[in-house]
Amino acid sequence: MADKICAKKEVVILNQDGIFPIYKASTNTQTITCNQLVCSECITASHKKHDLDSIDIVFNEKKEKLKELESKFSNKFNLCEIEDRKVNEFKTKYEQMFTESIQKINEQEKLIIDEVRKYAKTLREQLDSEKQSIEKSITEIEKRTEKVMETLLNKQSIIQEILESNQAVQVFGAYQELSGKEIPNASFKAFPEETKDFIPAKENLKAISNLFGSLTNTKLPKVLTHVNIDVISSYTTDQTALNRVLIEDEKKAWISNHMTSSLSKIHIADTMKTVKDIPVDVLDMSMTGNNDVLLSSYGSTDVSLLSTKTGEIKPFLSMSPLYPLGIHVTKYNEIILGVKEEGDIYKITDKICRKVKIFGVDGKHKQSYEYDKHKQRLFTVPYRITSNLNNAILVIDRTSDYNGRVVVMDREGQVEWIYQGNPHVNLI
């Protein structure tokens, strides 16, 4: 039965019970390559020269590491949930845009069809009117022709009777009467030379888009994820004020109290308990990649580094003669600082310095932001800073003791948007 684990090191150490311990890393950084559970029978075989440690020690260490992995998986899952909500919101908005576009096409189609029908009806009415006019002319010509033909037949019949009578008196009388009269002319009224005809606009159909409309590129809707905030648990602290809270892990947090000029380390279990108080008046703080804390403090030109293991605070980066305000460590281990000069915090003059500066984890300066592309000042008091998944910089910019705004800009310093609060709920 396995009661040990192999760490493949150099020394085999017995505990006080004479049982081989299991895998405990020494002070060196040698990589463990075996990491197998072993029993007393197989130690002398393939694990003879390997360092061993007790199962309990390794179990606890592995358990803590698994907790860390579980926390990372949980964070990733939360991000996936956010992305899933974004996808669903984007899908809904796109379907809405698509439906609205189809509806506009259908409405335009109906409008065009109705107008075409009205226009076609007008053309038919014009043709009907033209037809009536032409038919009237034809009817007049037909009546005139019929009357002339009737007169000619009547005269012709009279002459025929006189000739058949063979009477000299009648022949002389008819000749004198008829020869002096003009024979009705057979010339008719001219037919109309023009009428109306319909010419389909075949060539114009090539430019039907000018009449109907066309598709054009447009921006897809931006996804604004709605975050549902539920209270999981709540705690009562012994603090007189909570000015800034920084979560170290699921069991530990740091709380700054400006009223007592102190920073407290809090352990969270069934209750919340203060385990350490440090006399420092913290303005803002942010967790580094190795779980230490960078902080800015009232009246200091330094950014300080707090060791979460020892509680020791030491200078990390000097901003002199400027004073650090908001501080944020990004997921890429960049340090973003808000800074100001000494003096009235809200007095704006041409000589003041209100910037957001970016540093590497080594303290080297990378970038500064003070004015926008129109040479307008970006910030009054860059009081709090964070970054989002797109690596944009979000700054809470205080403009007075009671007013402020959120300024969001990209890494080129271009402002993406500014939020100044809901006017329906802003009190001042």
Image (spheres, helix red, strand yellow):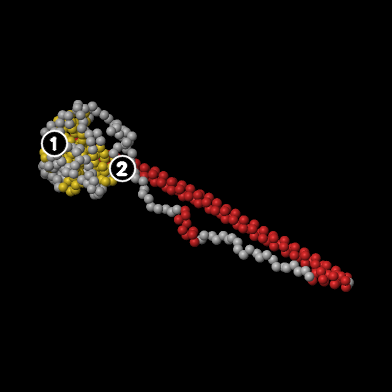
Quadrant for the N terminus, please: top left
- Observer-nearest of 109 and 267: 109
Q: Residue at x 24, y 41 (%)?
A: 395
What is the x, y in percent for residue 341? 15, 41
Residue 162: image quadrant is: bottom right
**Which residue sits at x=60%, y=63%?**
194
- Determine the image quadrant of residue 170: bottom right
Task: Please name the amino acid that badge 2 sits on.
Answer: Cys
Residue depicted at x 19% and y 38%: 347
> Image check: 166 left or right of 83?
right
SS at badge 2: helix
Tag 1: amino acid: Gly
**Mark 1, secondary structure of its residue:** loop
Q: Which residue is mark 1?
A: 299
Q: Local crowd at mark 1 within 10 Å, few (<14), some, or many (≥20)?
A: few
Q: Report the quarter where the C terminus lies.
A: top left
Q: Which residue carries the number 2 mark?
A: 80
Alpha carbon distance from label 2 to label 1: 42 Å
